[in-house]
Amino acid sequence: MARYRMVRTEFWKNPIVLEEMTPEDKYFYLYLLTNPYTTQIGIYRITKKQMAFDLGYSMESVNALMERFTNHHQLIRYNPETRELAIKNWGRDNLQKGGKPIMDCILSELKDVEDLSLILYVSESIPKQEIKNLYESFYEQERKWISKPVDNDLNRTEEEMMDDTFVTHHTIRGQKQKENKKEKQKQQQNLYPDVQSHSNLDPSLSVCQPSEEVKEIIEFWDANGFGISNIYAKQQLLSWLEDSSFLQPKEMILKAMHIACLNNKRNLGYIVGILKNWENKSLLTVEEVDSSKEYPQFEHKARGKAHSFSGGRVIPNEFTLDLTAGEES
């Protein structure tokens, strides 16, 4: 995550900004250039819900602004499937200097891009040829790799072959995820049949969620007395992995569950109440929760993946039993 972003004074002299943008457009454009999800390469992952939350706008307003910047101003591209946004003139304003540290950072971030077409889109406005070549060569290398035929093509269905045409827009990481999709489904079905068999009740439980995150949350839930058979509650809790503004959704869910255990409130409503409170106060990471002293009586952190907690009251670590308390001297 970037600590800061530079906006050049020429921003205000840009004819598009000066003559075509409304005050709301300018505010939105500055947000797109400086929000904490921006990267060195001008391509980053962000949801429209997060934009609305940060700006205090409705989803309708964000959708209207996105459409305006995509089709009217033609300054951005957004892939609604990968949630990736690319800024057309990012290279012109931010990639004017090279050097090994910059090149290494760019290469590292390019590897995280799923929609490869966005790489070419941004590269068009990069003035420094060395950096422009890096974008283009990376695009060509990734495109060739993911277009290689698979050995077992003859045994694949037409639907699977059509999937490959979509995968050509993704990086190596996305390709591997696609190839292992069925295997992950099978593994998750074997580990948690109760969640998988009821996933049709809530789209957020689809196996697109990383199995490690789902596994860790379910294990904590089952091991700490929240109710192994309470499938609906598990579904609602797992939906926070995708449908939240947290930067660390899994860690925040586990943190809330840990607090619920320490307070002997092992139910979904209490956990969701904590999570909503953190969202309302813009506490999006565990570090921010800890530094805010939101729950000072639970400052100590849980160690290990999951802990079993016995029922009854939790005795603070600093508590000292005084047998003479209340007696007259």
Image (cartoon, rainbow, N blue to C red):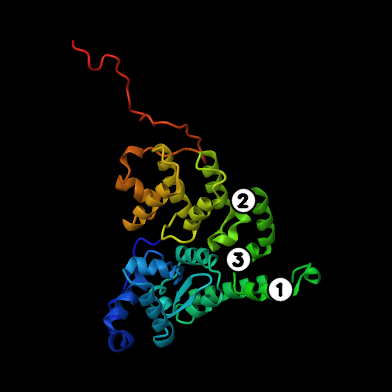
Q: CA gap, disc 3 to disc 1? A: 18 Å
Q: Name the element at disc 1.
A: helix
Judge the density around disc 3: few (<14), some (14-19), many (≥20) Cα neighbours within 10 Å. Answer: some
Q: In the rendering, at what x and y percent does residue 157 appear?
A: 76, 71
Name which of mark 2 and mark 3 comes first in the sequence.
3
Question: Residue placed at 59% from the left, 62% from the top?
Answer: 200
The answer to whether residue 227 is above or below residue 322 is below
Q: CA gap, disc 2 to disc 1? A: 28 Å
User: Which residue, given by chain and number where applicable, does mark 1 sit on?
Assistant: 159
Going by the numbered disc 3, the residue's amino acid type is: Gly
Q: In the rendering, at what x and y percent does residue 60 appear?
A: 38, 76
Question: Residue placed at 35% from the left, 69% from the top?
Answer: 34
> Residue extending furthest left?
329
Residue 208 visible in image:
no
Question: Residue placed at 41% from the left, 65% from the top?
Answer: 37
From the image, state whether disc 2 or disc 3 is nearer to you: 2
Depth check: give the residue in front, 96 or 113: 113
User: Which residue, given by chain and number where applicable, does mark 3 sit on?
Assistant: 174
Name which of mark 2 and mark 1 comes first in the sequence.
1
Q: Quadrant of residue 209?
A: bottom right
Q: Quadrant of residue 177?
A: bottom right
Q: In the rendering, at what x and y percent does residue 56 appear?
A: 31, 68
Going by the numbered disc 1, the residue's amino acid type is: Glu
Q: Name the element at disc 3.
A: helix
Judge the density around disc 1: few (<14), some (14-19), many (≥20) Cα neighbours within 10 Å. Answer: few
**In this rendering, position of residue 139 left or right of residue 310:** right
Going by the numbered disc 2, the residue's amino acid type is: Asp
Q: Name the element at disc 2.
A: helix
User: Which residue, given by chain and number where applicable, does mark 2 sit on?
Assistant: 194
